[in-house]
Image (cartoon, rainbow, N blue to C red):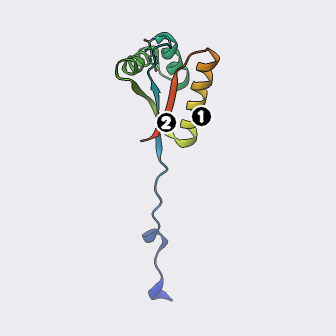
């Protein structure tokens, strides 16, 4: 019946998918140069940008390397941790909804 019909576009609210920050955490053991290499390798930054992020993490304890959809963020976290462990460094990488 016409009086009961409502356009779907008037009632359907689809939220955009959440984005996640991928962050590195500071520690006392992972070499600075290794962290810079990780940021360059997995977050497509040049050496200068990567050094800035590394120093922020070193001084402040945490720093954002990028913001991604959930699956991509989760893959980055896994890859960074696997690479760090393979090189026997304790580097921590986490994701958080932004
Ligand atoms: N604090 C480390 C050092 O002095 C360097 C470091 C930076 C480690 C960033 C982890 O996510 C990190 N060698």
Count residues near mark 1 (Cα–Cα under 10 Å), then give few for <14, some for 14-19, many for 20+. few
Front residue of this view, candidates 19 and 90: 90
Q: Position of residue 94 (x, y in %)?
A: 50, 32
Q: Position of residue 63 (x, y in %)?
A: 40, 26
Q: Position of residue 31 (x, y in %)?
A: 49, 10
* Residue ranking furthest to the right: 86
Q: How many marks?
A: 2
Count residues near mark 2 (Cα–Cα under 10 Å), then give few for <14, some for 14-19, many for 20+. many
Q: Quadrant of ligand 1?
A: top left
In this view, the mark in front (2 or 1) = 2
Residue plotted at (47% across, 43% down): 19
Residue plotted at (46% across, 78% down): 6
Residue that numbered label 2 is attached to: 95
Asked if the residues shown at circle 2 and circle 1 are in contact, with their CB atoms under 8 angstroms apart, the answer is no
Q: Quadrant of the C terminus?
A: top left
Between the C-alphas of marks 2 and 1, the distance is 10 Å
Front residue of this view, candidates 17 and 96: 96
Disc 2 under 8 Å from ligand 1? The reply is: no
The mark that comes first in sequence, 2 or 1, is 1
Residue that numbered label 1 is attached to: 75
Q: Is residue 67 above or below residue 26?
A: below
Is residue 75 rendered to the left or right of residue 52? right
Residue plotted at (61% across, 15% down): 88
SS for tag 2? strand
Quarter-of-image position of residue 78? top right
Residue plotted at (49% across, 50% down): 17
SS for tag 1? helix
Front residue of this view, candidates 68 and 79: 79
* Residue ranking furthest to the left: 60
Q: Position of residue 45 (x, y in %)?
A: 47, 21
């Amino acid at each position: 019946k016409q009086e009961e019909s409502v356009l779907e576009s008037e009632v359907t609210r689809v939220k955009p998918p959440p984005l996640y920050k991928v962050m590195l955490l500071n520690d006392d053991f992972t070499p600075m140069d290794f962290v810079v290499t990780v940021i360059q390798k997995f977050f497509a930054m040049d050496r200068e940008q990567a050094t800035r992020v590394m120093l922020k993490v070193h001084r402040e304890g945490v720093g954002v390397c990028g913001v991604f959809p959930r699956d991509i963020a989760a893959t980055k976290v896994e890859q960074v941790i696997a690479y760090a462990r393979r090189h026997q460094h304790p580097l921590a990488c986490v994701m958080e909804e932004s």
